[in-house]
Amino acid sequence: MPESRKGIKNPILSIPGRKAAWYLFEELVYPTHDFEKFRRILWAAVMRSPWLYKQVIVPKRSGKKRILQIPDADLKIIQERINKYILKPIAKHANCFGFSGGGIKDALSPFLQSDLAIFTTDVKDAFPSTSHEAVFNFFRQQKYGYNAAFYLTVLTTWQNNNPALPKYGLPQGAPTSPRLFDLCFVPLDDQLAKLAGRVKGNYSRYADNIFFSAPDFWPETKKKIIERSEEWPDDPCDTGKTYIKPAGQEDIEKNGGTLLWHAPIISAIYSTVGKGYCLTFCPGSDWDWNRLRPRLSYRLHKSYFARKGTILHALGLNLINGELHNTREFKRRIRMTIFNLKKALEQKDDFETKIWPLYLQLDGLQRFAIKETMPKLWDEAEHALLVPFEIRYFGEGGTRRKKVESY
């Protein structure tokens, strides 16, 4: 492990820094009661030592790839403790479901009671877009001292590979990332909930999926918002392609490579999320506050505008006699993922690159599963998820890594 890195001052070397480290050691109830081991991991996190995370590339159904950053077993222990003792007691937003509690039925219940048109969109790169400045800002707002907030930030964030994203953000694969994303998104939840109240509609967010209904969207006949990655022809990055505007729809605005049919409410949603909010605190002492105020903002994609039946089907759901049911295609995907996970376990495939990504895939599908409509398949999925979970989190301290390597 590198003990130092040029240009980085480790606060553990100072008396206040050591006191803050001991405070977190006590608050997190570190399982082995070994402060030197805790300090070693904390030092490595401050120095961004490369051994703390292992990168895994998982193919998507669309043909694209998802990059997972799997934390080292010892770091994961600390992150689990942060979840349990610091993040879990903090109340979630009333309109937020999924990562912080509540199922898909809870998130969609306001929309099932009316026939209003529904706009849905996803937060693009939700975890890595949540910058380390935003995480530090959150912990400072929870009244943690500067050093303690800094330690919690470096223990839960990691370097992004995409230059279009913040240099450091929440890693895909860390147990703290879902909850921290929810908590950092709260100011935007507030703004979107207020917008829904003004237009007499509904707003809810399930994980990184945003749902918004209103009595009057424009234009109501359009089912999907066109998304293009190319620039306008008069842009300096002109690709040589031209665009034909939809007949009768002259008002089109460009937002981050996305072309929108102009609808005031939808534009307001994009604007709210795109502008984000200013951060109160920022790590480091080299920020010129008169020149720069750091801001957390997100981008949206996979946007649809339709009636509730279309939206539900896209989520793998059907509405039958007022009750939510999973579609046959969704059930088939769960069965196939269960089969692949069990097969990988039987063949003793590599845990980090094969088994754990399948676990995460099945766990993600289970978030949209309705237990009452497929109890046997639900139980089968839960049992399949239990095996890799126990392998990953077996025992305490160093026994966990040994279990993973010899499962």
Image (cartoon, rainbow, N blue to C red):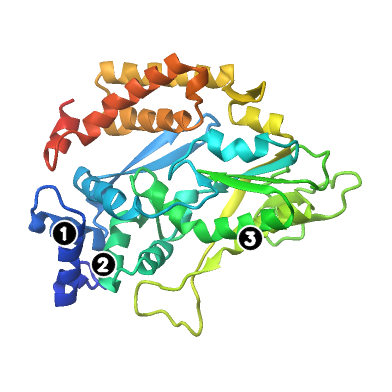
Residue under label 1, please give it: 26
- Going 60% across and 37% down the picture, which residue do you hit? 108
Identify the residue at horizontal 70%, vertical 30% (top origin): 310
- Quadrant of image for the C terminus: top left
Name the side, left or right, on which 244 lies relative to 66.
right
Q: Are marks 3 and 1 in contact (CB under 8 Å)?
A: no
Q: Nearer the viewer, mark 1 or mark 2?
A: 1
Q: Is residue 237 above or below residue 345?
A: below
* Residue picked out by circle 2: 148
The x and y percentages for residue 284 are: 34, 75
Viewer-proximal residue among 331 and 292? 331
User: Residue 201: horizontal and vertical position, in percent?
Assistant: 71, 49
Label whose residue precedes the other's in the sequence (3 or 1): 1
Give the residue drawn at x 33%, y 46%.
Answer: 174
Q: Secondary structure at mark 1?
A: helix
Dot 2 crowding, Cα within 10 Å, few <14, some 14–19, many 20+:
many
Q: Amino acid at mark 1?
A: Glu
Left or right placement of residue 244 versus residue 185 in this view:
right
Q: Is residue 149 above or below residue 165?
A: below
Which residue corresponds to mark 3? 272
Which quadrant holds residue 199? bottom right
Q: Earlier in the sequence, mark 3 or mark 2?
A: 2
Nearest the eye: 203 or 156: 203
Rendered view: 368 above or below 275: above
How many labels, in total? 3
Mark 1 surroundings: few (<14), some (14-19) or many (≥20) residues within 10 A: few
Q: What's the distance in space between the residues labelled 1 and 2, CA to CA?
A: 12 Å
**Which quadrant would residue 305 be assigned to in this image?**
top right
Q: Amino acid at mark 2?
A: Ala
Q: Provide the secondary structure element on which disc 2 rests.
A: helix
